[in-house]
Structures are given as structure tokens and as C-alpha cells.
Image (tube, grey):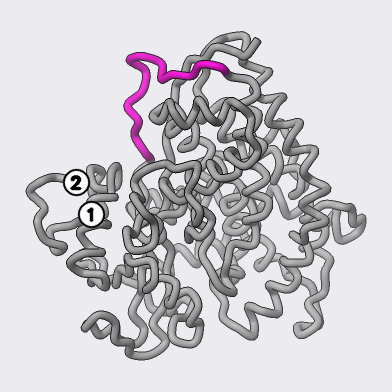
Amino acid sequence: MSTTIQKPDDLNFFTPELQECPYDAYKLLREQAPVWKDPVTGFYFVTRYEDLRKVLLDTESFSNVRPKTTLNPERTERIRKLYEEKGWTPAPTLAGRDDPNHKQMRAMFDAAFRAGKIKEVDPLVEQTAYKLIDGFIADGHCDWVKQYAVPLPLIIIGKQMGAKEEDIWRIKAWTDAWVQRLGMMLTEEEERWSVEMEIEAQHYFQPIFERLRKQPDDTLLSDLVNTVIPEWGRTLNDNELHAEMMADTFVGGSETSTNALSAGMMLAIQNPDVWARLKQGNDKDIRTFVEEVLRLESPVQSLFRIAAKDIEMHGVTIPKGAMINTRYASANRDEEHFDCPEQLNLDRKNAGSHLAFGSGVHHCLGAPLARRELYWGFKAMTDRFDHIQFAEGKNDFKHGPTFCLRALKELHIEFTPKK
């Protein structure tokens, strides 16, 4: 953050400079304005750990249902018509619902993502992690993002969603387009392109839905397509399924893991003492490393809640209907909860208490699968590599421009394989 920024209202979270390194800005807000109304968007930022926990756990005061009104209703209507004319208008996702509707739908997802189901996927995750590294290890160098962090979770979720492995880069293009829209930095023309990419994905998956209705199999998607929600008396319809495919399965099930795998390699190289311990293969160290990467780099920097009533926090009145930006990445570096929060510490006792997966009834349903992907992703890294370093002159360490996520564009590394 620029040294010229001395007060919160000088902050603009849509500038590339601040998005590239937001952590000083978060610290400024925690200290001076823990509940801050962003003058650019009108959103209310909540940045302290304890405050964020209260927001996430109080679903009566803080709603997940998005208001019908938007900042640009005419543009929103034009986008809605595009869905209607060419594809399926996405229904509210699981994350965009409140109880009892959310609870009823969540029960189906919890069953589909149950521990036993994730355990069945575990060998595939392990095999894929080692197979990917073994595919480039003889080269002595790679783009870690493109050759490892992107394909690992995409292959896993793709197989569970009925996609072919050879289509993962096509799917990646669709998720990238969707994520750019989530980042809230697109022109209307760019937003239309993003929606048309999503509609292309809808037409890819619609025949898979129809096949699974006739011939169920053992995939997660088959469970989502065919499970009847008792309170609704029906399965998910096409509009609901298409919404979940992009938001909660492919973006939620791959993008965040990709970003954490990318950040983990960067942090391992930046912290040689940590890498020296990790490559000894201690299982506890690898598991703590997973949590510390999630805490320090927070693949999902923030999401949203809606004030269901007027709310007072730290002397600030948040009016009913206001958008609240839940800055997980700030809470995960809150000095009041984590000692020396900017340091990667393999001995941190409360590393797993981070909010990278949210908290409460909306806690990320894919968290168990993500943790397995990160565990095997980093274990394969520690098993295969001895020395690791950044490839000289090839990295700018830039993250994609987005309001909500943190994603390295590329990471060129060089390595010496273990003998």
C-alpha cells in the first residue's frame, strides 16, 4: 500500500496496486475503521476476526439472499434476457439462500459431499498430484500455476461432474470468465462475453444432466441431479443445477484450490526454513502448511452478506438492505487472534481457526475435498522436489484483478528433483 494512504477513505479496492498487496490496507481498516463504508461501492467492510465471526454466525441479522435491486437495473435486465434467450437463467445458489430453504438444500449437498464420498475420491487426488509432477519433473522447470495448480483440482472436480479430462482447459476458460464477473470490474460488453461463456458451459453440461437422470452413476453430480429434496418434493431443476455447476462446483471446487496451490509454492520458496522442514515429510507439518497457506493468502478474499435490519457495530449504523463485504483475508491476519499473523508458522496452534472457508451454516461445503487436494498437492511437492526457486527474470508475481479472489496468474519455478 502506498505510504501516501493515511486514512481509510483514501482506499480504493478497485486499483490494481491495492489488489496486488491489500494487507496493509486491511491492517489500517482493522485499526481505524473496523466497520467501514466504502465510498466507491457503498459496501460496508467488516475486517476484524471476532466481528466477522459474529456476522457469519448471526444468519438472522445478516442474510445471504441478494436484493432484487442492483446498482444498474437496466444493465441487469439486459443480462437476464441474454440468459433467457440463449440458455438457462441461474437460480439462487446454495450460498445465496437463507434457512429454511438453505438448510433443506444444504442437506442434499452435505450427503453428496459426505466424508465417505470424499474418502472414495482420495486415491484419485493422490494419483493425479504425483502424475502431474512426474509429467514435467525431468524438465527441471515449469509454470507451476498452469502445469499443476490449475489441472489438479479441475481434473478431480471434472471427473465428479461428468466432464472429460481433455476438456479441462475449456472448462477453465468458462470458470475464468465467471470469476472475472465475480470480480466486479467488467464493462457491460465484457459482462455479456462472460455470460455467453457461461451459457456455452450450460449447453455442455445439459446433456450430462439428462443422461444422469436416465442412467445414474456414482459421481457427485449424479447425486445432485437425482436426489429429491424432501421438503421441496422434487430434485433440482435445470436452472438450479446450472447455477450450482459454475458457482459451487467448478469455481468453488477448483478455483480456490488452484489459488491456494499457487500461493503455497510461492510461500515455500519465500520461506526456505519452512521448506527445509516440509521436505522432511512430516505429516503434521504438511497439514499445518495447508492451513497457513489458506490463512495467509486467503484464496477467497471476501464475500457478501445483506443487513436484514439496521445494525450497530463500532459506532457505525449499517442500514437494513446494505451490502456487507466480509473480508476473510483481513480477519485471517488479525493480530488479536493470530500471533505474528504475517509469518508462516508451522508450529501455530490455531492455524486451522482461519476463516478461509467461512464459518457457521454457510461454511464451505467443499472444504473437506479442498483440504485433501491441498494435502496431496503439497505432499507430492515435498516428496518430489529437493531444491526449489523462482525462475530468474520470468515472474512478475501479479495477481488477477478481482475484488473477491486472490489468484496468481503464473508462477515460473526451477527445481532439483529428490534422488
- List x then y, in percent, for residue 30: 25, 64
Q: Which residue in the structure is indicated by mark 1?
A: 25
List x then y, in percent, for residue 308: 42, 87
Q: Is residue 344 above or below residue 147?
A: below
Crowding at dot 2, Cα within 10 Å, few <14 / some 14-19 / many 20+, comes out as some
Question: Dot 1: what SS?
Answer: helix
Question: Which quarter of the picture shows residue 220?
Answer: bottom right
Quarter of the figure that contains the C terminus: top right
What residue sits 41% from the left and 68% below the top?
A: 76
| Magenta-span inclusion, residue 395 | yes
Counting the numbered discs, the total is 2
| Above or below, comparing residue 11 to residue 136 in the picture | below
Q: Secondary structure at mark 2?
A: loop
On whether residue 189 falls in the magenta region, the answer is no
Q: Quick check: 313 above or below 412?
A: below
Q: In x, y percent, where is residue 331?
A: 38, 61
Query: Looking at the image, which residue is at 38% across and 78% down?
Result: 69
Dot 2 amino acid type: Met
Pointer 2: what residue?
Answer: 1
| Kind of residue indicated by mark 1 | Ala
In-image side of 268 versus 71 (left or right): right
Name which residue lies at 56% across and 31% down. Answer: 278
**Contact flag, marks 2 and 1 (Cβ < 8 Å):** yes
| Residue range (magenta) | 386-399
What secondary structure prevails in the magenta region?
loop
Please state which of residues 153 and 90 is positioned toward the viewer in this rendering.
Answer: 153
Residue 130 percent across, percent down from the top left? 70, 26
Image-based side of 266 in relation to 156, left or right = left
